[in-house]
Amino acid sequence: MKTNILFILLFFGWLAPTHAQNVPENIILKNLNGEEVSFKEFVKGGPVIISFWATWCKPCQSELEALKDIQDDWKDKIRIIAVTIDDARATAKVKSLVKGKKWPFEILFDTNKELYKALNISAVPHIMIINENKIVWTHSGYMPGNEITVVEKALELAEKKN
């Protein structure tokens, strides 16, 4: 029985790290202030947790709330960036949702889904860890408790740097 569960988890990518894919070049996103940022430069160094989300995605919001709830574990050790895939018409809605929920994350807008597509993401929520401009871990979907695993993995990488 345990073998079957392990196989299922590996099959769905829960325990399987990615093959250290490089962060895409030349992708420009906007932050909450409307300023353009180079994604590759923005995530330089690391480790950085990237959470792709949308305002219409309830599991996305649950994941971000769960990450916020455990922020004392990661607050001064790793960065978390929430990348919204909402279109440009939803900018005001994104800003008010982020403000209302008091999310302590850096927020970026991928309104044309350029980054989303470049990373071959097919659904939200989708979370990944980037370390030294390489994607070292990725996972789609959200189940309560997933946030602990991703933060632990990022903290392990941060400790190795020190």
Image (cartoon, helix red, strand yellow):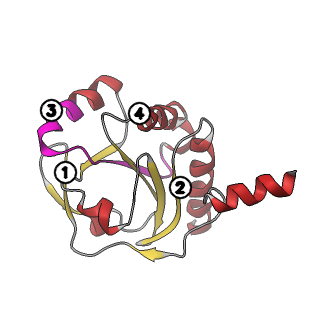
Instruction: Based on the picture, tell me whether residue 74 belongs to the magenta stretch.
Output: no
- What secondary structure is marked by label 2? strand
Q: Dot 1 surroundings within 10 Å: few (below 14), some, or many (20 or more)?
A: some
Give the mark nearest the N terminus, 2 or 4: 4
Amino acid under disc 4: Gln
In the rendered image, which residue does mark 3 sit on? 92
C-alpha gap between disc 3 and disc 4: 17 Å
C-alpha gap between disc 2 and disc 1: 21 Å
- What secondary structure is marked by label 3? helix
Residue 135 against residue 12 in the figure, above or below: below
Residue 127 against residue 157 in the figure, above or below: above
Residue at the (22%, 27%) spot, across then down:
96
Give the mark nearest the N terminus, 2 or 1: 1
Residue at the (42%, 51%) spot, across then down:
79
Residue nearest the viewer, comparing 159 with 109: 109
Residue at the (23%, 53%) spot, across then down:
110
In percent of width and height, residue 27 lies at 22, 68
Farthest residue in the top direction? 100
Give the mark nearest the N terminus, 3 or 2: 3
Asked if the residue at tag 1 contacts the one at tag 3, i.e. Cβ–Cβ closer than 8 Å, the answer is no
In percent of width and height, residue 33 lies at 14, 43
Q: Tell me how many marks there are.
A: 4
Q: Dot 4 surroundings within 10 Å: few (below 14), some, or many (20 or more)?
A: some
**Quadrant of the image occupied by residue 28:** bottom left
Residue 139 has which mark? 2
Quarter holding the C terminus? bottom right
Amino acid under disc 2: His
C-alpha gap between disc 4 and disc 1: 18 Å
Q: Which segment did they paint magenta?
A: 76-95
Give the mark nearest the N terminus, 3 or 1: 3
Residue 111 has which mark? 1
Residue at the (18%, 45%) spot, across then down:
87
